[in-house]
Amino acid sequence: VEGRRPSLHGRLMTSSENAPARRGYLELVVRRLRSGGSMTSPDEALVRGLSAPRRLVERAGQILSKQDKGVHFVLDGWGCQMRPLAGGRRVLFAFILPGDVIGLIPDDGDEDRLLDSVALTQMTIVDATSLLDRVDIAQAVAGLRVRNRTRLFDQIMRLGRHNAYDRVAHLLLELYTRQAEIGMVDGPRFLFPLGQDRLGEMLGLSEVHIHRTLSKLRADGHLAAGAGWMALSKWRALALQVGFEASDAWPR
Amino acid sequence: VEGRRPSLHGRLMTSSENAPARRGYLELVVRRLRSGGSMTSPDEALVRGLSAPRRLVERAGQILSKQDKGVHFVLDGWGCQMRPLAGGRRVLFAFILPGDVIGLIPDDGDEDRLLDSVALTQMTIVDATSLLDRVDIAQAVAGLRVRNRTRLFDQIMRLGRHNAYDRVAHLLLELYTRQAEIGMVDGPRFLFPLGQDRLGEMLGLSEVHIHRTLSKLRADGHLAAGAGWMALSKWRALALQVGFEASDAWPR
DNA sequence: CGCGGAGTTGAGATTGTTCAAGGATTGTGG
DNA sequence: CCACAATCCTTGAACAATCTCAACTCCGCG
């Protein structure tokens, strides 16, 4: 296996040295909003020009927006929605990726308040509430929130009906697809800055078994992995094999 | 074990002989709407007086409201939200109980269109779209829809982090709680008109293992079961043991 | 009375977990 | 520059949980 993931998670494909403040990160958000399938396409210039101060979430484990729970854009880094469990364990419900929209819409009966959003690497986020006055942007954001919920169905399918091999493959395919939609992939190669234990928490499997499953995927020629990235060279075949279809494709 | 479930599922605690048309069933819906936690309590008389024609869903397996996907109240019988899977298998995402609200809110970006709502027993439902003009009722319905989504989190916790024993116990506790909220329980006793295979589809376990787990629950003195019903005599202790807390309790 | 559906039970095969140890990489402080 | 700690990855072996297959029972129904 080639190389290790550097312990400083922030050092990703999309990052140059002290890049988190760079303007280009908002481009990911623009593409994500565009992919949401809302009727009117949002005013992209307005998003690109968002001038709210960036917030750097230094360390993994920090809770995002504990106090101010407004809508934020994720510019860089990975997080998750989770719930703590007895004995230091926890359940992960979803991964949060660069370009994603997180946080609560004010005065919206929103079930997400029952979950914690937590950083899994260093992250950069930016407050986007000022943009929500614009109807087109608010619509696009709402569309993305529906997609996020829709993805829970896939999570339930994985946990309920798949074995370890299919679970891992299915989740990696999701991560690949989500990044491909906003142009973050390099051919079959996509970002994965997390450890195997995180995959375990997400898929309800032990870290050891995650490792064995990844090895099997590698042996089958489906997976390659390195420091901070993975690659699914034959992802179409794999998607067919494990019954993956992005159920949040839009429209159905 | 005491008795078998009669093969005609419709014959439940709440049913007398040809009861599905009886007016009293709407009382369950009223209580359910009241339990939703919306700000203003809905106009209950209006709900009780709902005069739309009942629709009898004869047989298990029939899809509810394939054509007209408006909001409906469930007066009697059980159903589920599911997605079909290759090889005749399927995933169940949630059970639908008497008193529940199902169906799509028109013009709402709603992820439920990605699922099928299917009858698991004979059911009686009634179109409720005419009531949605009332703001108070619409609010209560919206609140219930959020709760339904919230319950998916529990499903993910069960599948991802519990063993068979805890999964079954946790689900039965949910079913007990949901029925208790609207006064459908008789002490520790609640309705369960489904077969063990349905529990298996819901919890990602084989029917055989469901049976063995139910036996263990019975041996531990937690569970009693008969034709169409179950009882959780020591449900507080059981809830503590498996970490059950109705995460859709309102407010948090 | 025999049929069909659901519940029940046992035995063996699979899958995944736990415990424990070793190896590689990176960052840190002397 | 090197020793060391920390973190993650890797591997093996024993163990536990769950599945599959197959038979058998019980009951209601026609």
Image (spheres, coloured by chain):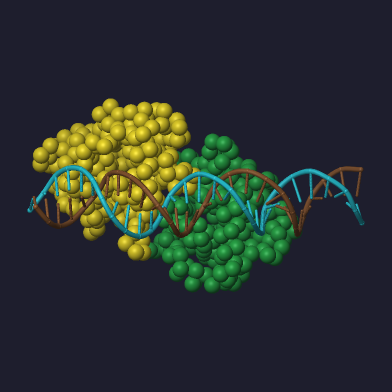
Chain colours: A green, B yellow, C brown, D cyan
Is residue A157 depicted above or below B50 in this figure?
below
Instruction: Report whether residue A246 is seen.
Output: yes
Left or right of A252? Residue B99 is left
Which quadrant of the figure contains the N terminus of chain B? top left
Residue A201 image point, x, y percent: 55, 48
Quadrant position of the C terminus of chain B in the picture: top left
Residue nearest the observer in this picture, B236 or A66: B236
Direction from residue B136 to residue B13 in the image, left or right: left
- Residue A54 appearing in the image: no
Q: Residue at x 27, y 40 (%)?
A: B192
Q: Nearer the viewer, residue B75 or A42?
A: B75
Count the marks: 0
Please state the horizontal and vertical placement of residue A7, each as a whole percent of the image. 72, 53
Return the x and y of residue B20 as percentages of the image width and height. 14, 42
Q: Residue at x 43, y 40 (%)?
A: B166
Which residue is found at the position 54% from the left and 64% from the top?
A176
The x and y percentages for residue A208 are 60, 53
Tell me the residue at 41%/35% (across/down). B246
In the image, taking residue A140 as reference, residue C6 lies left or right, namely left
